[in-house]
Image (tube, grey):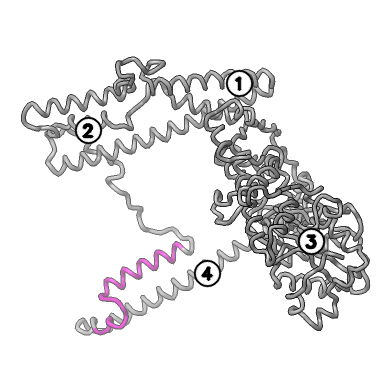
């Protein structure tokens, strides 16, 4: 989430900085719901139950749309700032709100309504954060009066041209890609690459890895080829992150008060469930008794009806005969006794075939009829399948126990001597890597180091086959040879069908056991480190190529060209002045290599010889707020505000055409 900063006008540094997120967890001790704004110490969060309430933001694509969440954030900000409140809890201070370029008038109107109605502020002004950053850096001499600001924030990126010190919003350009998408893409790649460590790869940790290790490649394709070829330069750019060791969590024993509260809550829930079950049971008994009385009354009436009149009498009852009514009465009586908890008289029926499921397996074929032979084959198939399933289940259980045993032994060795354990692990990892690579070369070259043993320089297929594959080829050749001798009698004998089982690829067990080595190598690699290679530049690349994550929009360099083409008044001199002062601001422009890549991309779409200068803001994260603070401290600021009287008299229509002037 992006940060929200609150301060008094004219100050150079903010008084408080917090994430604009809101959580509403429950206290584990009392079950009371509390509201938490911003970040809190993880040691304190263990006292809250956050399973049902995740962090929520008031923003969606850089636009405020959850004003209930925004109200919590404003309450927290005003309280921490110590804003004076008169009677009726009113904030007696003008407020300057930063927003994105071309913010929807509905969002601006709702924000004004919240500030005027809930907080009673005297006046409100709205300004674009990127414009404030550009004006602040212009005062510092970083950029010129005419130029272009490229703001890449948390969820969106904007390009806004400046002419004569004023932003030209009708020529701005927006892309829905920002730092959030870079972090999310990196988290997805690392989770796919290291599934065992998905719980460790939290959003905060991935954000830290992104800011510490990611960079913008000067040329994406050339950089990717370096890592594809595995050059020495690629190895130098590869970063390894050692997973920090965290001790097993030790839960504090619950207090007597908490134990008593949980016991009382459990008893209350149990009593409620018992009452519901008793009410359901009573209702069921009443229904069965009424049904039983109805059937008995119907049988009593049938005794006074002649046999010839019984069908016409039963035609309206839904029953066909007296025996059907008696059977229904017996069934209802048994259900009633069961509902009352009485022992039923019905005897439990047993399946006579359940104890002898495979009775024909051991009987010779000559003692069975053709139908019995079919049944025997069916029983043999079912028995074989069941036994194979049990063996596979037992094998999986044994493998799981073996993995747990190995992990336990590794943990004991690590705790006993961490340095020795690390050296042994690295040595074994290197040996397994060489063994796996050697096996791959043997499979490719057929047992020859260079693969040039024959005259043609190639390798025969027979040299690349293992023992099981060679046996399968021999069986196929033998079957084809026998078939060519005379009459085709394959399949008459049961032994013939065993050939399919022997030739099955599922029965292809590699003699050398490469799967075990590769699995062990993967397990050791997972315990050793997390490697950041192509991910370092692949994730930030989406700022210039959003189509990598399925977003069909332009990148930062193309945004500059689109924005300049939209200028209402254009000329060679204006274009050159703008490209000579391109300012990067926002948290996503902190990646190394951003300025060089942006300059190279803009140079590709501009005429040859055009002066291009790309600079970064003095503080890309806080310059927007510093510019807004300086603007709010100016003498002409009150004339730029929207007062409470304007809100009641002019309403939303005035906000639709509201635009702040920055040249004051």
Q: Is residue 661 visible?
A: yes
**Mark 2 or mark 3, earlier in chain:** 3
Mark in the foreground, 4 or 1: 1
Provide residue 507's location: percent of width, then percent of height: 32, 29
Q: Is residue 501 left or right of residue 397?
A: left
Say which quadrant the C terminus sits in: bottom right
Q: Secondary structure at mark 2?
A: loop
**Is residue 316 part of the magenta span, yes or no?**
yes
Q: Could you tell which of marks 4 and 1 lies nearer the N-terminus?
A: 4
Q: Give the CA separation, mark 2 to mark 4.
A: 54 Å
Q: Quadrant of residue 559?
A: bottom right
**Looking at the image, residue 583 lies above or below residue 62:** above
Taking the image as shown, residue 86 lies to the left or right of residue 239, namely right
Q: Which residue is pictured at 72% across the width and 38% down the height? A: 250
Q: Residue at x 61, y 18 (%)?
A: 424
Given this view, does label 1 or label 2 mark the residue nearer the observer? 1
Q: What residue did someone put label 1 on?
A: 426
Residue nearest the observer in this picture, 552 or 267: 552
Q: Which mark is residue 362?
A: 2
| Disc 3 to disc 4, C-alpha distance | 53 Å
Find the magenta span and give its range. Answer: 312-338
Q: Count up the numbered dots.
A: 4
Q: Which residue is mark 4?
A: 282
Above or below, 110 against 225 in this view is below
Up/down of 196 relative to 524, above or below: below
Point out residue 378 in the picture as x, y percentages from the top left corner: 23, 41
222 in the magenta segment: no
């Amino acid at each position: 989430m992006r940060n929200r900063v609150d301060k008094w006008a004219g100050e150079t540094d903010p008084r408080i900085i917090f994430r604009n997120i809101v959580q509403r967890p429950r206290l584990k001790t009392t079950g009371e719901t509390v509201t938490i704004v911003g970040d809190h110490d993880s040691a304190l969060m263990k006292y809250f139950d956050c399973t049902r309430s995740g962090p929520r933001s008031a923003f969606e694509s850089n636009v405020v749309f959850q004003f209930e969440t925004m109200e919590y954030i404003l309450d927290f900000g005003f309280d921490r700032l110590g804003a004076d409140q008169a009677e009726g809890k009113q904030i007696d201070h003008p407020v300057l709100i930063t927003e994105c370029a071309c913010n929807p008038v509905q969002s601006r109107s709702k924000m004004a309504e919240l500030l005027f109605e809930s907080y009673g502020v005297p006046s409100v002004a709205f300004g674009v954060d990127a414009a404030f950053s550009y004006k602040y850096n212009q005062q510092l001499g970083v950029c010129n009066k005419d130029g272009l600001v490229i703001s890449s924030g948390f969820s969106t990126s904007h390009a806004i041209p400046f002419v004569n010190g004023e932003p030209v919003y009708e020529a701005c350009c927006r892309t829905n890609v920002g730092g959030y998408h870079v972090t999310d893409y990196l988290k997805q790649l690392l989770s796919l690459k290291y599934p065992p460590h998905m719980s460790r790869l939290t959003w905060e940790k991935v954000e830290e890895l992104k800011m510490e290790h990611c960079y913008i490649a000067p040329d994406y394709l050339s950089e990717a080829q370096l890592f594809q070829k595995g050059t020495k330069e690629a190895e130098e750019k590869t970063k390894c992150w050692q997973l920090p060791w965290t001790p097993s969590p030790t839960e504090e024993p619950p207090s007597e008060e908490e134990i008593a509260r949980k016991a009382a809550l459990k008893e209350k829930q149990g009593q409620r469930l018992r009452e519901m079950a008793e009410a359901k049971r009573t209702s069921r008994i009443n229904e069965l008794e009424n049904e039983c009385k109805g059937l008995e009354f119907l049988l009593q009436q049938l005794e006074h009806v002649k046999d010839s009149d019984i069908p016409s009498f039963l035609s309206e009852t839904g029953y066909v005969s007296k025996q059907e009514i008696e059977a229904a009465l017996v069934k209802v009586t048994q259900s009633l006794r069961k509902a009352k908890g009485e022992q039923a008289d019905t005897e439990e029926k047993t399946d006579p075939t359940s104890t002898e499921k495979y009775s024909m397996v051991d009987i010779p074929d000559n003692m069975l009829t053709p139908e019995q032979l079919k049944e025997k084959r069916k029983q043999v198939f079912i028995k074989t399948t069941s036994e194979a399933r049990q063996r596979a289940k037992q094998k999986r259980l044994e493998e799981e126990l073996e993995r747990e045993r190995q992990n336990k032994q590794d943990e004991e060795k690590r705790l006993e001597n961490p340095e020795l354990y690390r050296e042994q692990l690295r040595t074994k990892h290197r040996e397994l890597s060489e063994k796996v690579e050697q096996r791959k070369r043997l499979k490719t070259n057929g047992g020859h180091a260079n693969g040039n043993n024959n005259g043609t320089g190639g390798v025969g297929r027979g040299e690349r086959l293992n023992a099981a594959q060679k046996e399968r080829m021999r069986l196929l050749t033998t079957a084809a040879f026998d078939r060519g001798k005379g009459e085709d009698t394959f399949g008459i004998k049961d032994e013939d069908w065993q050939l399919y089982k022997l030739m099955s690829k599922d029965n292809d067990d590699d003699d050398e056991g490469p799967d075990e080595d590769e699995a062990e190598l993967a397990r050791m690699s997972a315990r050793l480190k997390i490697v950041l290679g192509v991910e370092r530049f692949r994730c930030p690349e989406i700022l210039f190529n959003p189509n990598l994550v399925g977003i069909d929009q332009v990148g930062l360099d193309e945004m500059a060209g689109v924005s300049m083409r939209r200028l209402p008044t254009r000329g060679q001199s204006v274009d050159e002045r703008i490209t000579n002062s391109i300012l990067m601001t926002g948290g996503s422009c902190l990646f190394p290599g951003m300025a060089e890549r942006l300059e190279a991309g803009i140079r590709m779409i501009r005429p040859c010889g055009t002066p291009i200068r790309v600079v970064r803001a003095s503080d890309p994260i806080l310059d927007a707020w510093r510019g807004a603070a300086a603007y709010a401290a100016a003498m002409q600021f009150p004339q730029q505000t929207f007062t409470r009287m304007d809100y009641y008299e002019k309403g939303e229509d005035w906000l639709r055409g509201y635009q702040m002037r920055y040249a004051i």
